[in-house]
Structure formats: C-alpha cells, structure tokens
Image (tube, rainbow, N blue to C red):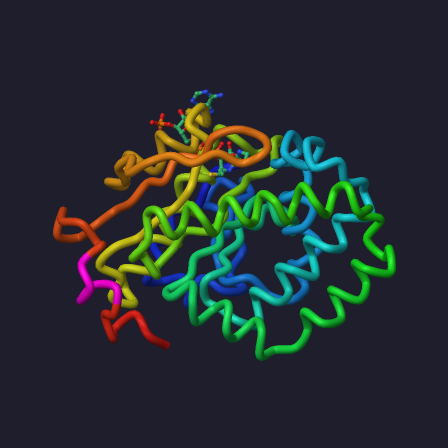
Amino acid sequence: MGEVKKLSAANLGLAQGTLAQDGCGAQVTEYRQALVGDLPGIGEVFFVAFAESIQHAGVGPAAQAAIEDLFGLVLAAEPEGLIVAVSEGQVVGYTLATVNAKHMRRRIFEHGGWLRILWRLLTGGYGIGWRTLRVILGDKRSFLRGARMYGGYQARMLSLAVHPNAQGQGIGRELFGAGVGWLRGRGAQAIRLEVRPDNVPARRIYESFGFEPRGEYQDSQSKWMVMTWESSGQSAFRKEEREDPRLSS
Ligand SMILES: CC(C)(COP(=O)(O)OP(=O)(O)OC[C@H]1O[C@@H](n2cnc3c(N)ncnc32)[C@H](O)[C@@H]1OP(=O)(O)O)[C@@H](O)C(=O)NCCC(=O)NCCS
C-alpha cells in the first residue's frame, strides 16, 4: 500500500487532487475532502470494515447502495466533514466529522434527498426487509438515548473506517487526525464519539488524541462507549459550551 503522505487538516484543501508519487516512486496516500465520485468507494469501505455489524443487522449486498446514498446526503450537508484516504486511485478509508450534529441533521432534512432514499427503502430497492429495519431503527433509538444521556456535544466524530487490506499502516490515525484537526480549526471546544469498548485499534487512536471514556450504553449488538475530548479538560455539559456560537454554521 506504500507510504502514507502526512497531511494536516490545515492543508487538506491544498492536498485536493494532488495524489502523486514520493521521491522513490512509491505510491502515497492522499487525504482530502470527499467528492461525489468517492461515494461508491466509501460505501465499499464501510461495508467491508463494518462487516460484523452488517452481518448482525442481516442486510445483503444490495444495502451497499443505501450506505452510498446516505453518505451522499451527508456530503451535501457537511461537505468538508467527509474526508477520504485515496491510494492508487482507490478510496481506502474515510472519516466523517460534523461541527454541529443538530445543524447537520437539519440540513439533511431540508435537502429532501432522504425522501428518495426512504421510498427506495420502503419499496425494497435496497433489499432491506422489515426484520432488519426493526433492528436498525431499534439501534438508532439506543443511539439517540445515548446522545441524551451524555449530551451537550454538538461537534462529533461520526465514523472512521479503513479497508481491511489497508489497515495497520497508520491511515486510520491520519484520517482521524485530519477530522479532529478540522473540527478544532472550526472552533470546537468539545468533541464526542462512540466506539465499541473492545475495539482496541480505534481506542488507541482516540486516546492518543486525548479522548477519554465518558460512559456506556447498549444496542442490540453490544455496548457502545462514549468518549469525549474537551479543550479545557472540563465537562462540555455546561450550557455555554452547548450553545457555543462558533459551532454554528
Ligand atoms: C479502527 C480503524 C479505523 C483503524 O485504522 P488503521 O488504519 O488500521 O489504524 P492505524 O494503522 O492508524 O493504527 C491505529 C492503532 O491501532 C493499533 N492496531 C492496529 N491493528 C491492531 C490490532 N489488530 N490489535 C491491536 N492494535 C492494533 C496500531 O498499532 C495503532 O496504534 P499505535 O499507533 O499506538 O501503535 C480500522 O481498524 C477499521 O476500519 N476498523 C473497522 C471499522 C471500525 O471499527 N471503525 C471505528 C469505529 S469507532
């Protein structure tokens, strides 16, 4: 997979479209904001990296199109928050961050594209049956309950995944650093994420960026651990942080 080109969030913009070779001719990995053309690659990475959860939900390969469509909505709502790692022309990883989860949800709702997705879902276009839908909706309810239990963090790291063939080369750490760097650059004083407690590689990354365990909740598969980073080292439950105008967009 070659050497990873080190790029900070600050120069993500500059990095766009600059995939090149290093001085020795080895392929390097480019980190940049996602483009619409990256959506199939992102869907594929999601599908293989989260294979266990996908198996648990009981969805088939047709559901990959649903993932692509959902990331398409996210890209429209928070274009700078979706960052990809590209190597040899292929998306090998992505991360998704939002400055303000509430505002992102509103922009997704206003976008209207979700209606097409809902229609395709209900008419069987993604091959997702009612039993699976119940599992997914139940887990979404757990997620929202968890958000209320450990609330007050609008800036979120929502997803991180690297293709299994490219794992263990520092790409996950680089992507996460780019996402967190972008959030901090936008004024985030507190950031929240969720991780399965037994996900050692992910936790190593998050802990090295100063994220600490805050609490746990359960969904149909297993436990989620809530982790947070706070610039002040103080709780983000405070009202002024919840309503920090710098986190509005
Ligand atoms: C979590 C994930 C994104 C990490 O990506 P990656 O590119 O493999 O990670 P890196 O190469 O940057 O390594 C990150 C850390 O994990 C460690 N690590 C990697 N594989 C490991 C393993 N199998 N066991 C234990 N530690 C491991 C690395 O040593 C590194 O820690 P260090 O820098 O302190 O040495 C990737 O494993 C993945 O996509 N997993 C499936 C999806 C997922 O769980 N996403 C996170 C959801 S919260």
Instruction: Identify the residue at horizontal 71%, vertical 32% (top origin).
Output: 55
Q: Residue 10 falls in which quadrant of the image?
A: bottom left
Q: Main secondary structure of the magenta part?
A: helix
Q: Position of residue 5 (x, y in %)?
A: 43, 46
Question: Camera-side residue: 237 or 164?
Answer: 237
- Position of residue 160 relative to residue 201, above or below, is below
Q: Is residue 111 left or right of residue 222?
A: right
**Residue at x 45% of width, y 41% of height:** 4
Q: Residue at x 66, y 77 (%)?
A: 112
Residue 104 magenta-highlighted = no
Q: Is residue 158 left or right of residue 239?
A: right
Quadrant where the image shows the N terminus? top right
Q: Indicate the position of residue 154 as horizontal and vertical percent values.
A: 34, 61
**Residue shown at 79% from the left, 58% from the top:** 121
Judge whether 107 appears above or below 25 on screen.
below
In the rendered structure, the answer to whether residue 64 lies left or right of residue 188 reads right
Q: Nearer the viewer, residue 119 or 3?
A: 119
Q: Is residue 239 magenta?
A: yes
Above or below, 122 relative to 202: below
Q: Which residues are magenta?
A: 238-242
Q: Quadrant of residue 99?
A: bottom left
Image quarter (top left, top right, bottom left or bottom right) of the C terminus: bottom left
Q: Residue 69: percent from the left, percent from the top? A: 70, 61
